[in-house]
Amino acid sequence: MRVISPAALEEAVCYLLKSACVTLPEGVRQALSHAQSRKDNTERAQKVLDLICENARLAECENLPVCQDTGSTVIFLEWGCQAVLESGTIQEACDKGVRRAVEEAFLRRSIVKDPLLRVNTDDNTPSLVTIIPAEGEKVKVTVLPKGAGCENMTKLKMLRPADGKEGVKEFILEAVKSSGGNACPPLVVGVGIGGDGSKAPTLSKKALLREIGHRNPDPYYAAFEEELKAELNETGQGPLGLGGSPTVLDLFIESAPCHIASLPVAVSLNCHAARCASKEL
């Protein structure tokens, strides 16, 4: 049995949150750079992409957040069945890490204690923790700072099984198209299919953790990802919704079993500053 100290988990969350807010994942940077280097884009799209890439470069050089909205702190923990936390709770350790990162990196305080009373917690806690059971002693921490602009464009729909793949496709395309420039494209799109009304959105957010260009291991869903990505990039919505290309950097699907009478589908969007960082303890 492996024992994980609360201090180690706190330190990992703190480090990953500060890192994710400042430095974009390599795959995201490469995708943006590739889009910037295209010679067949509109003048407006090219200017937007130039600004996006320059902003990312300056954020890393100056060690400043790539976006002023440092978001809700979404944390995914792959936690092995042979690993235990030495004391306290996982939530407490994660929140301590978030508080430290907010103070040390001067991150914006964006979380309110109650959705209607709107009093700020003043430390960006609580974090949103999802635990994914794993085998053995593995403990992997992934931090996804999620800004409100893209989070507010999240969509969930309970389709009928008879709607099938075409119904799923229609909903996904419309969910992205209707977001316009609100989610700050070019986007990374996460899709969750299956489970229930609570599981599908979690799947869609988990999909955002995948590295750019890494397809679903199931050939059926891998092909569906490519199909949806291509169609969305043919819409011409473009960077910040101002026209041109690309509209999406990539699209990922996660699926799960579901009830015979249900077909839940959720779509989560990540803006061009698709922030994410991981490490194993």
Image: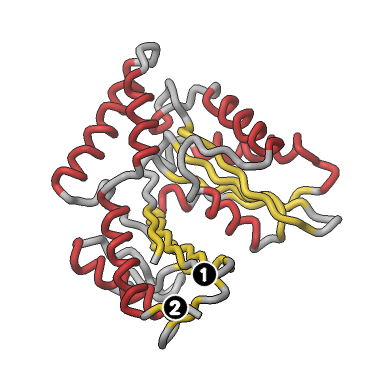
Q: At 37% across and 80% down in the image, what residue appears?
A: 5
Picture coordinates of residue 183 (x, y %)? 43, 42
Q: At 25% across and 66% down in the image, what residue appears?
A: 102
Q: Are marks 1 and 2 in contact (CB under 8 Å)?
A: yes
Name the amino acid, label 2.
Answer: Ile
Distance from the alpha carbon under mark 1 to that under mark 2: 11 Å
Q: Is residue 116 left or right of residue 134?
A: left
Q: Quadrant of residue 40?
A: top left
Picture coordinates of residue 272 (x, y %)? 38, 39
Q: At 14% across and 46% down in the image, what residue appears?
A: 62
Residue 145 bears which disc, if any? none
Q: At 37% across and 54% down in the image, what residue appears?
A: 277
Mark 1 lies on residue: 79
Mark 2 lies on residue: 90
Name the amino acid, label 1.
Answer: Trp
Can residue 122 be seen by looking at this rendering? yes
